Image: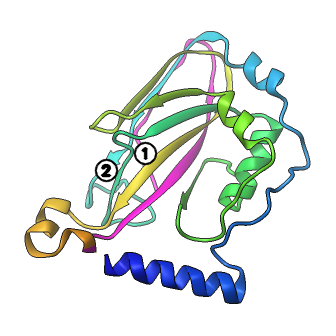
Amino acid sequence: MKKNILRIACTTLLCSQFGMGCSSAPIKLPVPFDEQQARAQLVNGSNQLSGTILYEPDHGRVLAYPDTFVSCAGREVMLLPYTDFAREWALQYYGKPVTDMAYRLSHRGRSVTVVGQDAFFAASRKTECDDKGNFSFKNVADGEYLLLAKVKWLGKDEEAYNFGFAPEDIDEEEGSIVKRVSLSGRERQVLTGPWP
């Protein structure tokens, strides 16, 4: 609770003084979203993409925060055709070209909204991670994609931390990770990390 109040106060201060962490006007990308192009890649194919996004500390598979849990359990995963719009959207949202993988914490930095974003997300395949962080997309067409997963970073072992501290003091962050993938020729690709 204390952390949430402090976060809101800091965000308000940054917003009013420096324009950081604030909502901004929707960004118009240099290329428009081509829904027909994206949906053409969403036809059934012969590939399969699956994986697991649920890692614990000391397993060597969490890059950015090695002492944290990273989980997509119960959260949405999207498979988005990698079009020119997808490339430019990822550059704006994650702040760098996504040649392999990137991540973003929801409550840090400015809010990013892109013109055409809703249609871009709608032209995708969607699933949800199970409670073990597993996801799967079957019958995927050949092509390049962005795998976009909503995740939670948990800074401590929740059960151990609840034993000694107040639950509201657990360091949790919501956000997303994105990974660029390529599928072809009846491929069965399994993603196991490392994740940010």
Instruction: Please tell me which residue is depicted at 32% across the width and 33% down the height of the picture.
Output: 130
- Would you call the spot at circle 2 few (<14 residues within 10 Å), some (14-19), or many (20 or more)? many
The x, y position of residue 4, in whole percent, is: 39, 75
Instruction: Please tell me which residue is depicted at 50% across the width and 43% down the height of the picture.
Output: 149
Mark seen at residue 51: none
Q: Is residue 20 at least partly visible in the picture?
A: yes
The vertical placement of 137 against 69, above or below, is above
- Would you call the spot at circle 1 few (<14 residues within 10 Å), some (14-19), or many (20 or more)? some
Asked if disc 1 and disc 2 are in contact, CB closer than 8 Å, the reply is: yes
Mark 1 secondary-structure assignment? loop
Left or right: 71 as drawn, with respect to 196: left
> Disc 1 designates what residue?
193
- Distance from disc 1 to disc 2, alpha carbons, whole Å, reads 9 Å
The vertical placement of 122 against 96, above or below, is above
Q: Is residue 97 at least partly visible in the picture?
A: no
> Disc 2 designates what residue?
55
The x, y position of residue 187, in whole percent, is: 54, 18
Left or right: 178 as drawn, with respect to 150: right
Left or right: 74 as drawn, with respect to 101: left
The vertical placement of 39 against 170, above or below, is above
Mark 1 residue type? Gly
Residue lying farthest to the left in this orientation: 163
Range shown magenta: 169-196
Mark 2 residue type? Tyr
Q: Quadrant of the N terminus?
A: bottom left
In the figure, residue 46 lies in which quadrant? top right
Instruction: Please tell me which residue is depicted at 14% across the width and 67% down the height of the picture.
Output: 162
The stretch drawn in magenta includes residue 39: no
Asked whether 9 or 60 is in front, the reply is 9
The x, y position of residue 175, in whole percent, is: 49, 56
